[in-house]
Amino acid sequence: MFLQLTTAANIYKPNQNTMQDIGDILDNRVLMVALIACLIAQALKLIIEIVQHRKLNVRVLVTTGGMPSAHSALVTALAAGVGQTLGWASPDFAVAMVFAIIVMYDAAGVRQAAGKQARILNQMIDELFHEKPDFSQDRLKELLGHTPVQVIAGSALGITIYWLARSAY
């Protein structure tokens, strides 16, 4: 085996294959389908926001939480694409599946609990300092995670997008 030494000088040299590398990334159909699933989920959040509140709030495109879970759509489509491409019994699919489970558990469990704690802390601050108008502390962000229904809807969307695009693999 040949050991290649890399110096600081040639780490920063522009690679002549950089454009090819970018092209390879853009040709990765598994990645593109997963990203499309994520973007569709984000677009659906905007549509749901418009229907529910009768106004355009583009902030929902860059905030966490909401229906459906874009993270769940992304990781589910990714895992399904890896399974379809490399085999359902492959170690790569196993890694993608475990990654998807961790992301969805975090979205519905840990981040949801953190959002509930933020809501309680905001209420406590409001009650403690309601007579002190000079106290101006930023409120904690309360919508951090997803409900289990939002995670399941995102996962179902990811599977649907994968299924519609499966011929691309």
Image (cartoon, rainbow, N blue to C red):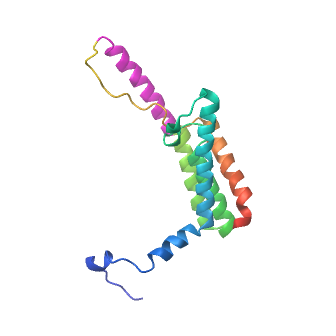
Residue at the image point whose x is 42% and y is 80% from the top: 16
39 and 150: which one is in front? 39
Residue with the most extreme top position? 131
The quadrant of the image that shows the N terminus is bottom left
**Image location of residue 52, percent across then percent down:** 63, 28
Q: In this view, does 14 lie above or below 95?
A: below
Residue 85 drawn above or below residue 75: below
Q: Can residue 121 be seen in this view?
A: yes
Q: In which quarter of the image is residue 8?
A: bottom left
Rendered-image quadrant of the C terminus? bottom right
State the residue in front, 33 or 112.
Answer: 33
Can residue 155 be found in the magenta stretch?
A: no
Q: Position of residue 122 (x, y in %)?
A: 39, 23
Q: In this view, does 11 lie above or below 140?
A: below
Q: Magenta stretch: give its range.
A: 110-131
* Main secondary structure type of the part rendered in magenta: helix
- State yes or no: residue 113 in magenta: yes
> Is 11 on the left-hand or right-hand side of 110?
left
**Residue name at image x 66 percent, y 59 percent:** 80
Q: Position of residue 75 (x, y in %)?
A: 59, 53
Indicate the quadrant where residue 134 lies: top left
Residue at image position (49%, 43%) is 62
Which percent across, then down, holds residue 111?
48, 38
**Residue at image point 49% right, 74% down:** 21
The answer to which of 47 and 38 lies nearer the viewer is 47
Please state the total of marks drawn on the protein image.
0
In this rendering, does residue 94 appear at all? no
Looking at the image, residue 62 sits to the left or right of residue 164; the answer is left
Task: Indicate whether 12 appears above or below 52.
Answer: below
Query: Left or right of 34: which side holds 17?
Result: left
